[in-house]
Image (cartoon, rainbow, N blue to C red):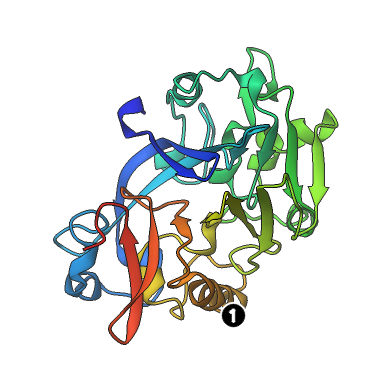
């Protein structure tokens, strides 16, 4: 993916930069909200043209984030990765410039101090490793990889089942196991603090043990959602069932509490899969609320 799609935001002294692997991926809205129809999307003027097509399909990105504090370089979620065998054809055998894009920030693979995975779905762990010509090796050799303790345990249990559907576990072989085998991983609690500016909060539902990243620096606040929501429409409709939530009841409760907490808070909300503008604010709007992307506030 071209560096032209990279974007950066400042939260106090913390810089957040997105690296995009799949740009403006479109699909039926019920990929995200199980009972939604295109007519609902068409009726929401604020979704157009950035987050939806004229015929009511959703637009989203597959992307990861570099979070830089004055002391640490953190990779948050590492996308899909090149040369992978995946359940969905669109994610199979990619050949993107993810690592080269990282270099435009003046960073080498060896400069990353922490890799944090909000959860362990295949599209959030891919660049944990790369093919070095003979094996899957850690992409960021000097980093500590942070996986949720509850999350990791739940996926290990799932590995005992032969599931090759949307929650396929085969990606563990090339993205997670090589990290664990080399002793580079720390299994963290759902309230783990990474640094003075960065900590995680629990957002169970999409997966068991899902977390999201909170940022605070110089009086400014931000949050990167992970997959507690996939599309800005969910800020307006947090109670609607999300198709890929492994625990739909918990996922609904998580979205509702997240929207309530961050609505009108001033915190910059960065959506893990939100198209451009990826960052913005959840604000009251009439009898409800919606997402106001940076540059689209009016």
* Residue 193 screen position, x and y as percent: 75, 51
Q: Residue at x 32, y 57 (%)?
A: 293
In the picture of the structure, the residue carrying the numbered disc 1 is 249
Q: Which quarter of the rendered picture does the C terminus lie within?
A: bottom left
In this orientation, does residue 79 appear? Answer: no
Relative side of 280 to 42, left or right: right
User: Callout 1: 10 Å neighbours few (<14), some, many (20+)?
Assistant: some
Residue 209 to residue 121: above or below: below
Quadrant hosting residue 161: bottom right
Name the residue at 50% across, 77% down.
Answer: 260
Q: Residue at x 56, y 55 (%)?
A: 219
Q: Give above or below for 139 relative to 196.
A: above
Quadrant containing the N terminus in the rendered view: top left
Q: Quadrant of residue 125?
A: top right
Residue found at the very far top of the displayed protein: 133
* Residue 183 falls left or right of residue 11: right
Of the pair 86 and 55, the residue shown nearer to us: 55
Q: Is residue 49 left or right of residue 225?
A: left
């Amino acid at each position: 993916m071209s560096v032209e799609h990279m974007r950066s935001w400042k939260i106090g002294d913390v810089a957040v930069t997105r690296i995009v692997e799949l740009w403006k991926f479109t699909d039926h809205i019920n990929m995200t909200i199980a009972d939604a129809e295109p007519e609902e999307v068409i009726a929401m003027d604020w979704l157009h043209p950035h987050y939806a097509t004229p015929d009511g399909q959703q637009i989203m990105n597959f992307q990861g984030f570099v979070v830089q504090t004055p002391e640490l370089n953190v990779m948050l979620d590492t996308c899909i990765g090149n040369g992978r065998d995946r359940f969905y054809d669109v994610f199979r055998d990619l050949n993107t410039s993810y690592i080269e894009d990282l270099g435009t920030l003046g960073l080498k693979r060896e400069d990353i101090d922490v890799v944090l995975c909000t959860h362990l779905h295949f599209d959030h762990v891919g660049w944990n490793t790369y093919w070095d010509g003979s094996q899957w090796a850690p992409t960021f050799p000097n980093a500590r990889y942070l996986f949720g303790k509850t999350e990791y345990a739940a996926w290990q249990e799932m590995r005992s089942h032969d599931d090759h559907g949307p929650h396929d576990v085969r990606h563990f072989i090339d993205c997670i196991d090589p990290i664990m085998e080399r002793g580079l991983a720390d299994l963290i609690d759902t309230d783990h603090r990474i640094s003075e500016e960065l900590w995680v909060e629990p957002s169970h539902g999409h997966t068991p043990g899902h977390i999201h990243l909170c940022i605070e620096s110089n009086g400014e606040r931000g949050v990167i959602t992970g997959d507690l929501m996939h599309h800005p429409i969910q800020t307006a409709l947090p109670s609607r069932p999300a198709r890929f939530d492994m625990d739909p009841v918990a996922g609904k409760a998580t979205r509702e509490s997240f929207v309530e907490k961050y609505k009108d808070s001033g915190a910059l909300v960065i959506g893990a899969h939100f198209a451009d503008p990826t960052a913005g604010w959840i604000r009251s709007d009439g009898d409800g609320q919606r997402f106001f992307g940076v540059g689209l506030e009016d």
